[in-house]
């Protein structure tokens, strides 16, 4: 398959597309590696040292991998660099956990015995990754799978395989043994399905759409494989009238335009308290109008192109649907084509008001730089609106009242809640969704435990 630049249509790379036979080879390679014990029989500290060497190599090659991530995915180069820096932090954090995998000893089971609880690697894990954060979504799986002692078969998105191939190559340089990381590039309905249904795979860790995640869960259910699913979202950013409004405008703007809005946690439902709604919309409209839209390799670019033609059509169709449903456009709404943008897949930051909760632009994940504004009167109404969605991935709360903020953290039904911040991630915090946003958690201690099986032992003793 040939990958063209979403910024200007240039040919970027040609990649060989694998099939079920390649998946079978890769799974057998991972199985042999796991069953040999070459990796999981090392001490956690030894595994951690190799993972840390991988982080060090990525740090040296930050320019190379960031450029590939920016060019293939279309994100601004500054964002790609931050993403790779975050990946380095994740590998270092996971390396530190590798040496700290502990169990429990239950001493009070009577004089003739003791109980043990152990955590051991699940085995061969299939890692299926989307295109929007090719590096972050990969390392949220790979770093912890390796720390736990698992062997992996990775299926990157066919649109963004470059950074995965680089990380796999760096892992060899870091001394991570052959067979631990296997990569098969290909389409979801061939390579992805073959990996999900392979009998020698013990677990699937998937990030992608709710539609595909649900199909994968059914397949894993049929063969009783463990699976962890990071899926779509339709998150709310709630702004109360006691918030620092300028900080909230910037946070809300970032919330729905980062990565061209192709962001699982995009804060695409903006809930504004009535008393500040008009001035907030005006400030946000101005911020949208000032956005620097441009090719991904320009250092000044804030908003890059969408990933491919099909995504451009999905987003522009949703904008047309919003207008047809009766919402009012206060910013954007068009494909951006001025000057050099004409060659790429750019859409202006788009803001709708006069939105009602039944509109499809308010209920469905759009995956573009498009947000809807709704107003609320008080705290209870804000929480009820935010929770009125099939998804449960993220929410944002903007207020200067700590009691209100903490009450909202408790009441909102999502895997992560940001207070006076948005999209700020750190490796120690688990990420994942409730409801249709998935099951299981990635990153943090909880993310490590997805890749560990719990085992119990009772040891009979002679008193
Ligand atoms: P997608 O579901 O189309 O594809 C994701 C991956 O699954 C790709 O590698 C794809 O080739 C593969 N795939 C497709 N069909 C498959 C099948 N039948 N069996 C196995 N694998 C299959 O998603 P996408 O368009 O690449 O990514 C966008 C979606 O990902 C959005 O819905 C977004 O919200 C979600 N996402 C979620 C998170 C999170 O942390 N919750 C993070 C990033 C993206």
Image: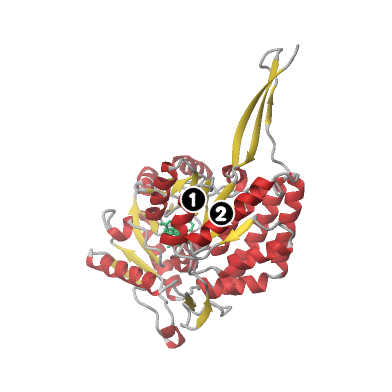
At a point 69% along the width and 40% down the height, the residue shown is 101
- Which quadrant would residue 360 be assigned to in this image? bottom left
Q: Is residue 423 left or right of residue 181?
A: left
Q: Which mark is residue 27?
A: 2
* Residue 279 vertical position relative to residue 126 in the rendered view, above or below: below
Query: Please, what secondary structure does the residue beneath circle 2 have?
Result: helix
**Quarter-of-image position of residue 275:** bottom left
Q: Quadrant of the C terminus?
A: top right
Label 2–label 1 contact, CB within 8 A:
yes
Q: Residue 206 placed where, x, y %?
A: 49, 53
- Drawn side of residue 101 relative to residue 71, left or right: right
Whole-percent x, y for residue 84 in the image = 62, 65
Instruction: Measure the C-alpha gap from mark 2 to mark 1.
Output: 8 Å
Classify mark 1: helix, strand or loop. Answer: loop
Mark sitting on residue 198: 1
Q: How is the image coloured?
A: secondary structure
Quadrant assignment for ligand 1: bottom left
Q: Position of residue 336 (x, y in %)?
A: 40, 79
201 up-or-down from 138: above or below: above
Neighbour class for label 2 at 10 Å: few (<14), some, many (≥20)?
A: many
Choose between 213 and 175: the one closer to the eye.
175
Q: Residue at x 48, y 73 (%)?
A: 303
For label 1, the crowd category at 10 Å Cα-Cα, with few meaning under 14, some 14 to 19 and many 20 or more, is: some
**Viewer-closest of 234 and 397:** 234
Note whether residue 264 is visible: no
């Amino acid at each position: 398959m040939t990958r063209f630049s979403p910024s200007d249509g240039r040919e970027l790379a040609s990649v060989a597309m694998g099939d079920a036979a390649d998946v079978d080879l890769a799974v057998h390679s991972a199985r042999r590696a796991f069953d040999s014990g070459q990796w999981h029989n090392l001490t956690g500290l030894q595994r951690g040292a190799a993972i840390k060497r991988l982080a060090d190599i990525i740090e040296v090659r930050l320019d190379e991998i960031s450029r590939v991530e920016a060019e293939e995915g279309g994100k601004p180069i500054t964002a790609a660099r931050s993403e790779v820096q975050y990946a380095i932090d994740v590998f270092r954090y996971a390396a530190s956990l590798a040496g700290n995998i502990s169990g429990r000893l239950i001493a009070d089971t009577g004089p003739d015995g003791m109980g043990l609880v152990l955590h051991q690697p699940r085995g061969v894990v299939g890692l299926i990754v989307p295109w929007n954060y090719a590096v972050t979504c990969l390392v949220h799986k790979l770093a912890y799978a390796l720390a736990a002692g698992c062997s992996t078969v990775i299926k990157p998105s066919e649109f963004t395989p470059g950074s995965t191939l680089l990380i796999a190559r760096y892992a060899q340089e870091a001394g991570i043994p052959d067979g631990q990381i296997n990569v098969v590039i290909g389409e979801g309905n061939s390579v992805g399905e073959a990996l999900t249904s392979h009998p020698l795979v013990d677990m699937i860790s998937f990030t992608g759409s709710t539609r595909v995640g649900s199909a994968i869960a059914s397949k894993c259910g049929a063969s009783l494989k463990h699976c962890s699913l990071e899926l779509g979202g339709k998150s709310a950013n709630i702004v109360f009238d006691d918030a620092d409004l300028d900080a909230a405008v910037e946070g809300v703007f970032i919330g729905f335009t980062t990565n061209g809005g192709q962001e699982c946690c995009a804060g695409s439902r903006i809930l504004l308290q009535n008393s500040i709604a008009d001035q907030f919309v005006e400030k946000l409209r101005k911020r949208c109008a000032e956005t620097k839209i441009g090719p991904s390799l320009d250092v000044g670019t804030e908003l890059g192109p969408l990933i491919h033609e099909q995504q451009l059509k999905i987003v522009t169709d949703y904008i047309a649907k919003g207008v047809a449903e009766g919402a009012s456009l206060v910013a954007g709404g068009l494909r951006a084509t001025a000057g050099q943008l004409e060659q790429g897949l750019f859409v202006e930051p788009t803001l709708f008001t006069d939105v009602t909760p039944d509109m499809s632009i308010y209920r469905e994940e759009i995956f573009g730089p498009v947000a809807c504004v709704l107003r609320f009167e008080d705290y209870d109404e804000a929480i009820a609106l935010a929770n009125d969605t099939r998804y449960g991935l993220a929410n944002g709360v903007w207020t200067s009242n700590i009691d209100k903020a903490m009450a909202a953290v408790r009441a909102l039904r999502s895997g992560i809640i940001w207070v006076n911040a948005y999209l700020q991630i750190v490796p120690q915090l688990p990420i994942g969704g409730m409801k249709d946003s998935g099951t299981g958690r990635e990153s943090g201690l909880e993310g490590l435990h997805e890749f560990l099986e719990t085992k119990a032992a009772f040891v009979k003793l002679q008193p």
